[in-house]
Image (cartoon, rainbow, N blue to C red):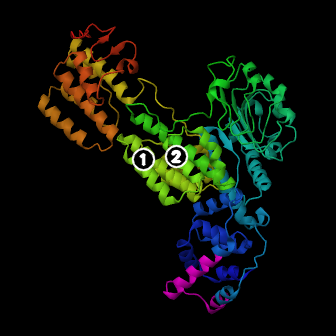
Amino acid sequence: MGNFGKIILGLDNHALQMVLHKTDWNVIYGAIIRENNDVQKKVFDNISARLANLLRYEKKDGFWTNSENAQRKIVSTINELAEYRRIIITLETADEIKRFQKESSLELKQDNFKEKNEKFAEQERDERIKRIIQAKEDEIKNDGRLRLSFSPYFDPEYAIEAFFSFLRERPDLLSCIKRLHLNYRFLNSTEGLIDLDSLEELSLSFDEDDSAELPEYIIESPCKKEISMHNIKILPTWVVNVKNLKSLYLSRSPLSSLPEEFFNLPSLETLDLSYTKLKEFPTGLTKMKSLKEINLLGLPIYAEQIPPELSPDIKLSLSRNLTVIPDHTPFFYEDYVSVYHKIVKMTCDFSNRSRREGLLSLEENLEEIRRDDIYHIGLYLVVEGTDTSIIDDILSNLIEHETDHYKKTLKRIILEAVLSIQAGDNTLCTILKLNSMANIKNDPLTAAIVDYFMSEEEDALAVLLEKTARLDTPAPKAGETEIFRFIKRAVMMADTARKEGLLALEKKVIREKGCLDIFEYGISLLVDKYDVEFIKKILENLVSHETEPAMKTLALIKKGAVLSIARGNNLRILVMKLVSLFKDNFDGLDEILPNQMQTSLYSMELSDNPGFRTIPKPLG
């Protein structure tokens, strides 16, 4: 053990906690990475469980820092706190600090991390595994899913065996498992334990060294299968024998071709070939009738190179001319949410790649994004080695020209994303930073972050990153935005009121517990015969509480709909009034509303509605 390790062990827990609190996580990581287990255990015992899991994740993924500088920073912090009498150090620890400072260079032992199962005493290790098992039990019961992944500080084989020993005593849980996710190395542990005939989904991940054949009972099992492989150069021959293989993920593998036999897979629906070494579209994919999705991101394959024989129903992800923030207007709240999630996913991918392979590795990602997109400009400046302040100035100037509120917010998020990538921030910090800039109701990413901070599982961070990677909020299609859905509802309600009277609306009001919707509330007041001016005042008060631009616009539209219905406006006037609240003109509205409600400035009609009449186009 070096002098630094003796210093850490010589501090009491209170002093060490104060030191670690003033120290960046990456400095802590760099300082202890080469120290022995006793030093590491004392540090991990004096930081939060979440930070400890983050450092373990960093170690697993091989992110290294300068140990000498990191240790010197921590010793400097100890001296500073001792000088101001914030902590008390013993004479023995003070002597170790002096010896540490006199050394011209540190001779660090290459202990690194010893056997993972030596990290904890056997009893403590078993207690931790028991807590993980309890958490997995809830996951199995609630979701029917069993995901087996353990902290690198456990011996995985020991943890898996302990877990399945527990399962053998709980047949009630075995019958609940519908989806099984685990690494190939531990597959044999399941034989004779789980009835694969009852599984609905089996997800296997393979590492570079996992080249052995799959067990026959897996190949022949009827359950749907999902397989992920990493760092493989040649696709194993056994893949073509896997019955019911539904999804195959080969992303970032140095794979340059697919064997001819591969194209005979009868059930494959999803194929991920993104960022592999393929140079052209595998023509054999046109023969695979079951394919529904192909991911070719990061490959030099463009739309004009896709064979016409490929079914147009297949969802195809290509790398050309990706626009992060679409140009179309109007830009709705749903567009904002969709683009925000896309930015978070892209940023996490770019950040992880640059930290492993260097910033220059992002050069090929530039080909995916349209040149005039602000994300492309930011990444280009990063790859060129531009100073942070200059990147900030350039992108900030571009942002100032944006007038749309949501697009401006998204561009600010992109600016922070680019700066995080350049700074080499870890993925968790990046996610937290970007999430803090968005104000989205019922956001799945926010929910995932809350779950992460509430979880005590060893794999909580991995679960958060997986949920982030699976964020998928497609941009809304024409007529699917909340505003247009509401306009259609308002038209139908107005039509009912005109035909049957206001009292007929009572049965059509939608009331949700604990929710005071402006439109439904206003209609209820109308049905109860309150004065229109009184209703108007009430609704104006409710609108004033909204601060989010999209929500305020929607609230104004709902207020306008209530008052229009109260005054008995005909349907064409109602639609024109509501549309005028969020658009500068009426052009293109007929492309957004459904066919039965064709609407434009001079021609509005509701084909199934006798109350909807055509406005004649004026002469000249």
Residue type for callout 2: Ile
Instruction: Check contact, mark 1 vs mark 2: CB within 8 A.
Output: yes
Q: Tag on residue 398? A: 1
The residue positioned 73% from the left and 46% from the top of the image is 167
- Magenta region includes residue 88: yes
The residue positioned 62% from the left and 43% from the top of the image is 365
Tell me: residue 436, above or below residue 584. Answer: below
| Label 2 element class | helix
- Magenta highlight range: 71-96
Q: Residues within 10 Å of mark 1 (few under 14, many from 20)?
A: few
Tell me: residue 283, above or below residue 275. Answer: above
Would you say 209 lies left or right of 588 here? right
The residue positioned 59% from the left and 66% from the top of the image is 25
Instruction: Give the main secondary structure, helix, strand or loop, of the magenta stretch.
Output: helix
Q: Which residue is mark 2?
A: 377
Of mark 1 and mark 2, the one earlier in the sequence is 2
Tell me: residue 106, above or below residue 553. Answer: below
> How many numbered discs sit on the rendered protein?
2
* Residue 252: quadrant of the picture: top right
* Residue 105: quadrant of the picture: bottom right
Would you say 470 lies left or right of 229 here? left
| Label 1 element class | helix
Label 1 – label 2 distance at C-alpha: 10 Å
Q: List x then y, in percent, for residue 468.
A: 57, 45
Q: Residues within 10 Å of mark 2 (few under 14, many from 20)?
A: some
Q: Tag on residue 118? A: none
The residue positioned 32% from the left and 30% from the top of the image is 511
Q: List x then y, in percent, for residue 35.
A: 72, 73
